[in-house]
Structure formats: C-alpha cells, structure tokens
C-alpha cells in the first residue's frame, strides 16, 4: 500500500514509513528520488531491488514513479535514506544466517559479479542472496593493475571460500589459480592411485596363474635363477608401492609457499600506491570538470546575459546547483539597489543547492559574507551572524579561511588578527592555517618598514 499523505517537511517522515517519489537522478552508486518539491531521498545501489541490478540507468529512468520504505531520517542535515526492496529485513537477515551456515571454508562455489571496485569484486554466491568480497590481492598470483578492464558486472566466476564471519556476516573469497590447482592435483592423484591398484591386481593375478601352470619348470630351475627372479619381483613391487609424484610435490611445496608470500607482499605495496594514485586522479578530474562547467556557464552568460528578474529565474531553474548563476542573480539585484531581495536570493540558493555540492554552497556563503560586509547594519555583527550559520553546514576550516580572505581583502587587519589566533587554537595541526598566520604577519612587517611591494602574500605562500 502506498500513502496518500503529502509531505512538506522532513519532520513528516519517520523510519519504516512507506513513501512514493519520482526518480530525480541516477548514478552508478544508486539514485535520488524526489518525495516532494522540498524533500529528496537517496537510495543506495544495494537497496534498489531484491535482485541484481545490471544497469540502474535503464531500470530506473528519470521520472519513474517508485515506492519504498524509509530507512533513516536526519533532520539536522536534511538527509533521508530509502530502500526500494520489498522483502522484510528481518526475514532476509535470518535467511542470510541460514545460508551462511551452509558455507564452509575451502568450498568451491560459482558466483556472479555484482559490483567491480578498485579494491576488489563483490560476488553474489549462486542460489543464495549472500554477497562476498574477493580482494584484489586474491584475484591472481600476479599483480592486477586495473580491475575494471578485466572484469564486468554480471559475469559468472568460480571462487573459493577463504573466510566466513557469521557475526559480521562477511564472506572472503579467492580466485587465485593455485586454489583450484590443488583440487585438480588431488583428483589426478586419486585417479592415478586407482589405476595403479587395478594394474597391480591384474599383475598379481597373471603372476599367480603363470606360477601355477609352470610349477614343474620352476622346481627344475637353479637356486641362483630363483634368487634373481625373486629380486626382480621385489624391485617391481617396491616401485609400484610408491605413489606417483609424491616426492616431487613435497620438495616443491616450500618454494611455492615462499613465492606466494612474496607476491602477496608486493601486491599489498602496489595496491596502496594504486589507491593513492586513484584518489589523486579522481580529485583532479573533479576539479577539472567543475572548471569546465563554470567556464561554460560564463560563456553562456556572456552570450545572452539575463536582463530581468524573470530571465534570472528561468536560469536558476535550469541550473539550480550552480553557485555562479545564483551569485550573478544577487549582483543583479544589488545593481537595482534591492539589498533585501539579494539576501532572499542568497537564502534561496542555500536551500536549493544540493547538500552534496559543498563547494557550491561554500561559494554562496562567501558571497553572503561580502554582501553583509558591504550592506550589513552594523557590518561586523552581520558578517559574524552569517559566519556562525555557515559553520553548521560547511567544513569549519574552509569557512574560517573564507572569512579570513574577506578581512584581508578589505584590510580589516585587527579582525583578521583575532580570527587567525582563534584558527591556530582550533586547527593547530593544519599547515595551511600556520602559513596564513606567517604570511599575514610577514606582510604587516613589510608594510611597517615601507617595503610592502618587496614581496606579496601570494608569493610567500607559493614559496
């Protein structure tokens, strides 16, 4: 059953409540649904469906009406999490426990890749609803550089269960060829032993029949020939009693173990380096993407700059998460001498921009600082009030640095000095804050001695 109640505030929501919404945005990690004009909720990839979701973009297109159950509500941060699964969580958890009891360390099972990450593969075990992790170090004896190019979601793979943690409900899997090679060797050895036993039985039968049919000839043979024949038979039987490849396997096993342990050490080191490189590459890629978007918006405004409030309203509706557009709208209202309207636009921007767009929200707060510093009454108190609000929603260190930049630009040295000493106490382990303090005092000393042009604060920071 889906509710007919219209949701306006986050206080109207509660855990386990059934809600409806339209898909607003879809990513590889899940989707966001719009519960009302003012309320959004996130749905993780693991909560999109009871089964495997191969392509979230195809199965959950933008605009699709969905119904789900509220998992958590955070009124302060205005975050809501919803699940679209239809099965009961308690029943699912009990079935997972029952399935876990059927899994044992060393079992070879078939699974389907559910998700590919840089650190490993999440694999759904066949005929169960259990998902295990095969770490990147357990994929192969050799180092794997890029998992995404080798494996794809939906592929079926053979894995070995390395560890089962029933308390945390975690399963560790392995796909190294050595795990399956031992089983193949055992199978080959057993088959060879069976064939050897059969050959030995046939040989003993032939020897006994031969001795029975030629007993007279054996009695006439010399003692020396009897001793020689018994010696040959003893040698043959002693060779047949030795299992095939037994000695070679025992001799080679220590070297193999040493090789695996060495490869494991190299894999761990390479994995740490790769993770760091991936983080830096993703951060750089995100910054470049933001710069491209900002440049495109600037070019758009230059070509067809809005000239009326209605045109700005259409623009902010088309780009609700762009701080550049909102700040341009504020500047337009200030050019019309409407300070209160500019303040209301800043408040709208803070409510409209998605909570995950931290940098865009921070840009609006900085613009709000400049607005109150110019038109506040009195400016100092107005800026402090906005500053205290910004601390509740953004990274405190970034907000402090933004206010410090305002004081430095407007040459409010006394306020900048007071703020710097507060920052030193609050962020005493931050190199950036210490450099800002040294730069500020260095610039002050140069200005006292009349050599302010000798070096700029930016030059000092870069040095």
Image: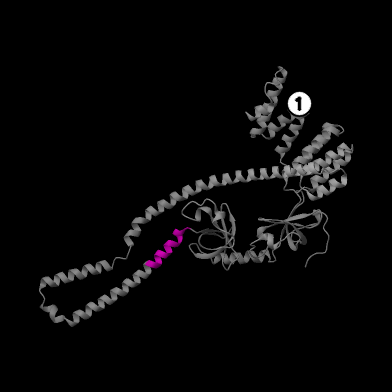
Which residue position holds label 1? 413
Quadrant where the image shows the C terminus: top right
Residue 184 falls inside the magenta stretch:
yes
Res 7 quadrant in image: bottom right
Residue 27 in the figure: left or right of residue 137: right
Which residue shows up at 65% across the image and 61% down it?
55
Residue 12 in the figure: left or right of residue 222: right
Magenta range is: 176-188
Residue 17 x, y percent position in the rendering: 76, 61
Residue 92 x, y percent position in the rendering: 64, 65
Q: Residue furthest front?
A: 303
Q: Secondary structure at mark 1?
A: helix
- In this picture, is 80 found above or below 103? above
- In this picture, is 432 found above or below 35? above
Residue 349 falls inside the magenta stretch:
no
Residue 41 visible: yes
What secondary structure characterizes most of the magenta part? helix
Res 210 quadrant in image: bottom left
């Amino acid at each position: 059953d889906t509710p007919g109640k219209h949701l306006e505030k986050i206080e109207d929501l509660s855990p386990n409540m059934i809600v409806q919404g339209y898909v607003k945005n879809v990513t590889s990690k899940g989707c966001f649904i719009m519960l009302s004009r003012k309320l959004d909720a996130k749905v993780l990839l693991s909560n999109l469906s009871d089964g495997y979701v191969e392509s979230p973009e195809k199965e959950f297109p933008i605009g699709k009406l969905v119904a789900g159950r509220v998992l958590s509500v955070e009124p302060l941060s205005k975050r809501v999490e919803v699940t679209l699964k239809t099965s009961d969580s308690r029943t699912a958890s009990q079935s997972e426990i029952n399935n876990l009891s059927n899994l044992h360390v060393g079992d070879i099972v078939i699974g389907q890749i559910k998700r590919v990450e840089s650190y490993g593969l999440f694999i759904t075990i066949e005929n169960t609803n259990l998902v295990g992790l095969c770490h990147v170090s357990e994929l192969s004896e050799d180092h794997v550089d890029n998992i995404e190019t080798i494996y794809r979601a939906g592929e079926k793979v053979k894995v070995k269960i390395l560890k089962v943690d029933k308390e945390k409900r975690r399963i560790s899997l392995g796909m190294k060829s050595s795990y399956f090679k031992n089983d193949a060797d055992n199978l080959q050895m057993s088959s060879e032993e069976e064939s050897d036993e059969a050959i030995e039985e046939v040989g003993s039968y032939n020897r006994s029949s031969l001795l029975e049919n030629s007993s007279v000839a054996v009695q006439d043979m010399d003692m020396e020939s009897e001793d020689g024949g018994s010696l040959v038979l003893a040698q043959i039987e002693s060779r047949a009693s030795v299992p095939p490849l037994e000695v070679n396997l025992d001799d080679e096993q220590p070297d193999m173990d040493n090789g695996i342990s060495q490869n494991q050490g190299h894999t761990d080191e390479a994995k740490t380096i790769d993770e760091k490189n991936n983080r830096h590459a993703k951060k750089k890629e995100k910054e470049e993407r933001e710069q491209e978007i900002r440049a495109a918006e600037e070019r758009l405004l230059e070509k067809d700059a809005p000239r009326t409030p209605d045109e700005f309203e259409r623009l902010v509706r088309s780009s609700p998460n762009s701080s550049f557009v909102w700040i341009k709208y504020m500047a337009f209202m200030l050019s019309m001498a409407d300070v209160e309207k500019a303040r209301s636009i800043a408040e709208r921007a803070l409510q409209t921009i998605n909570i995950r767009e931290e940098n865009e929200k921070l840009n609006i707060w900085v613009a709000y600082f400049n607005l109150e510093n110019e038109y506040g009454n009195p400016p100092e108190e107005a800026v402090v009030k906005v500053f205290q609000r910004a601390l509740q929603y953004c990274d405190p260190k970034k907000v402090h640095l933004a206010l410090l930049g305002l004081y430095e630009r407007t040459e409010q040295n006394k306020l900048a000095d007071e703020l710097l000493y507060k920052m030193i106490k609050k962020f005493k382990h931050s190199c950036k804050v210490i450099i800002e303090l040294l730069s500020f005092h260095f610039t002050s000393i140069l200005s006292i001695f009349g050599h302010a042009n000798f070096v700029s604060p930016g030059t000092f920071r870069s040095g």
